[in-house]
Amino acid sequence: MRKPIIGGNWKMNKTSMEAENLVRKLILELNSYEDVETVVFPPFPYLQKVKTLLQGTGIAVGAQNMFWEEKGAYTGEVSPLMLVDVGCRYVILGHSERREYFGETDEKVNRKIKAALKFGLRPLVCIGEKLEERKKGLAEKVVESQLRGSLSGLNPSQISQIVIAYEPVWAIGTGETATPQQAQKMHKFIREILERICGEKIAQSVRIQYGGSVRPDNIRELMDQPDIDGALVGGASLDAISFVKIVKYGGK
Ligand code: PEP
């Protein structure tokens, strides 16, 4: 039985005060809600404050990125050790915006996953095809290659610690969601690849989130699909009411 996991990726949004207001509203609504594992991903400067506000609640905190080294002369970077130190449980790796604007490759994602695991952080690994790739019939090929590249060299026990987020790039921030059937087809495919990489038992236990314009009005149908185990939510996670509605979509 895979416990659903829903994450709110705030991206580069919110002031410190806005972050606090949002978190306080989430605590009121979600503190005792245990059907879903809820994680928020604030920008780096607010991680510690958000973690302090969420202390003792069921809502976890994660970071949106990290570097693979533990410490050293890497100006502007943040290490896995630092994220653990401020109380992060998860870290998003390989988000399409990082691949697009910051040159993140599968090889870099792979190094980051290994570093995160070494320090006890759980990687939430994003994969997904672009619109041109889907139109050319290459969606599965691209997703398989990203998955295999990102997980290269990891053993089954390491893979069991990972959450995968299937995020078709054409659906991120566009208002266009993959249909539940399109998403389910890809999630099933991802699970089949996982099975080939690490065996059926682990593949069946890994949670695969869908991401791409998830909203209160489409979460239920997505979550009704057998291989969709949660959602990574961007825009709709910036508003407490809509994020709470998504988290409380009604249960699997
Ligand atoms: C995301 O950034 O991971 C995302 C899915 O964004 P949005 O929900 O805004 O499409």
Image: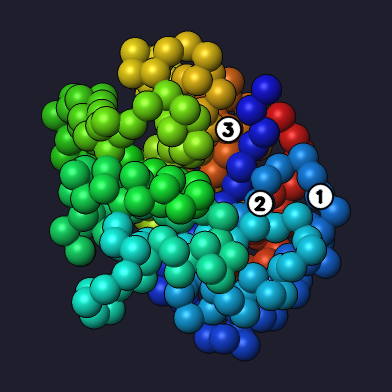
Mark closest to the chain's N terminus, 3 or 2? 2
Q: Is residue 132 visible?
A: yes
Residue at point 39% right, 44% down?
125
The residue labelled by disc 1 is 33
Kind of residue at badge 3: Asp
In this rendering, the answer to whether 25 lies above or below 160 is below
Ligand 1 is within 8 Å of the C-beta of the residue at disc 3: no
Spot occupied by residue 15 in the image (x, y as percentages of width and height): 53, 86
Mark closest to the chain's N terminus, 1 or 3? 1
- The residue carrying pointer 1 sits among few (fewer than 14), some (14 to 19) or many (20 or more) residues within 10 Å by Cα, namely some
- The residue carrying pointer 2 sits among few (fewer than 14), some (14 to 19) or many (20 or more) residues within 10 Å by Cα, namely many
- Are the residues tagged 3 and 2 within 8 Å (C-beta)? no
Which image quadrant for residue 149? Answer: top left
- Are the residues tagged 2 and 1 within 8 Å (C-beta)? yes
The residue labelled by disc 2 is 38
The residue labelled by disc 3 is 229
In this rendering, the answer to whether 10 lies above or below 181 is below
Kind of residue at badge 2: Thr
Which image quadrant for residue 185? Answer: top left
- Considering depth in this image, is 84 or 133 the residue closer to the camera? 84
Which part of the image, by quadrant, shows the C terminus?
Answer: top right
**Element type at mark 3:** loop
